[in-house]
Image (cartoon, grey):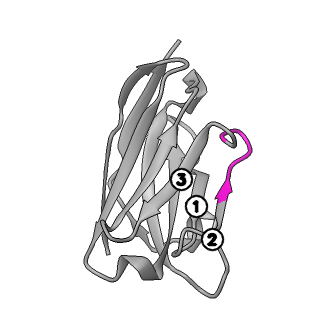
Amino acid sequence: VQLVESGGGLVQAGGSLRLSCAASGRTFSRYAMGWFRQATGKEREFVAAITLSGASTAYQISVKGRFTISRDNAKNTVYLQMNSLKPEDTAVYYCAAELQRGSYLPTRREEYDYWGQGTQVTVSS
């Protein structure tokens, strides 16, 4: 599966952005999807994930209540709505995909096999 992120940019603290990740190549609805981010000089970290049906989601504690992950299987796209952005949210954001196994929702970087190229999000104070 090929993944292409879009929607990043520069925004002031308190603002909002919506990231999109378009998938192609295989059956999108068979994949759990995740968003990760990597700030300069730091490890890539989990942000959010969603099961293939969209019924279950998971979030990093620092974004819970501010970010929302969703998916549209008819459009082969997963979204990350980011509200109340903070300077510490500045990072390159990556979309990732992994074949869904039962009801398990992967949240660790090493569990995902497919990755996009990333999109930069910069939050100014």
Question: What SS does tag 2 mark?
Answer: loop
Depth check, front residue: 125 or 83: 83
Q: Amino acid at mark 1?
A: Ala
Whole-percent x, y for residue 70 in the image: 50, 57
Q: CA distance from mark 1 to mark 3?
A: 7 Å
- Left or right: 20, with 53 as reference point: left
Depth check, front residue: 56 or 86: 56
Which numbered tag is attached to residue 106?
2
At 49% from the left edge and 22% from the top edge, which residue is drawn?
Answer: 15
Q: CA distance from mark 1 to mark 2?
A: 7 Å
Query: In this rendering, is residue 80 above or below 16?
Result: below
Q: Quadrant of residue 97?
A: bottom left
Mark earlier in primary sequence (1, 2): 1
Q: Quadrant of residue 73?
A: bottom left
Which numbered tag is attached to residue 69?
3
Q: In the image as oriented, which residue stretches furthest toward the bottom?
A: 102
Give the labeled residue for mark 1.
49
Q: CA distance from mark 3 to mark 2?
A: 14 Å
At 61% from the left edge and 69% from the top edge, which residue is drawn?
Answer: 55
Magenta region: which residues? Answer: 58-63
Q: Would you call the spot at circle 3 few (<14 residues within 10 Å), some (14-19), or many (20 or more)?
A: many
- Between marks 3 and 2 in the image, the one whose residue lies nearer the viewer: 3
- Between marks 1 and 2 in the image, the one whose residue lies nearer the viewer: 1
